[in-house]
Image (cartoon, helix red, strand yellow):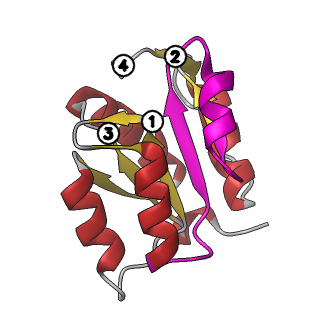
Amino acid sequence: MADVEKQTVLIVDHDSETLIFLKLILEPQGYRVLLAGGVETALRLLRHDALAIDLLLTNMVLPGANGGEIARWSRALRPALPVLFMSRFEDSEAVRLKVWDSAILDKPVGEEAFLERISAFLGATPIPARRPQKAFRASV
């Protein structure tokens, strides 16, 4: 299993409440969290070669691009970077058909399920949640 404290998650979402909420879940577990409120910021972080990024967690719907486009751009820059998409669309099966080898995290999701999904992607052992479970219901 990987050491959680050395793993960095880049979260891309246009909703600042979602970014903060997810950061508040991940950081106490030892993850390093980078936040991008849009496509340009995400690409700037991905282009920064000295910056270690272990997982790209991106919303499927963003102003100026969609999660699939961000994933393609990230793979061009970092071919081995795993991508986890977030979506609150009920027909996320339709979205899955457009996403080649990544997974989708359906919103809302509870804190424990969210941490399990992140740790599974990164091969880490999650630390049990220390707070009461909350459902993540942020906007698209």
Residue at 70% x, 39% y is 116
Q: Which residues are magenta?
A: 77-103
Tags 3 and 2 touching, CB below 8 Å? no
Helix, strand or loop at mark 3:
loop
Spatial separation of the CA atoms under disc 3 and disc 2: 15 Å
Helix, strand or loop at mark 4:
loop
Three-letter code, disc 3: Asp
Residue under pointer 3 = 13
Residue under pointer 4 = 138
Spatial separation of the CA atoms under disc 2 and disc 4: 12 Å
Three-letter code, disc 4: Ala
Q: Is residue 112 visible?
A: no
Helix, strand or loop at mark 2:
loop
The residue lying toward the viewer, choosing from 137 and 99, is 99
Tags 3 and 4 touching, CB below 8 Å? yes
| Above or below 77: residue 67 | above
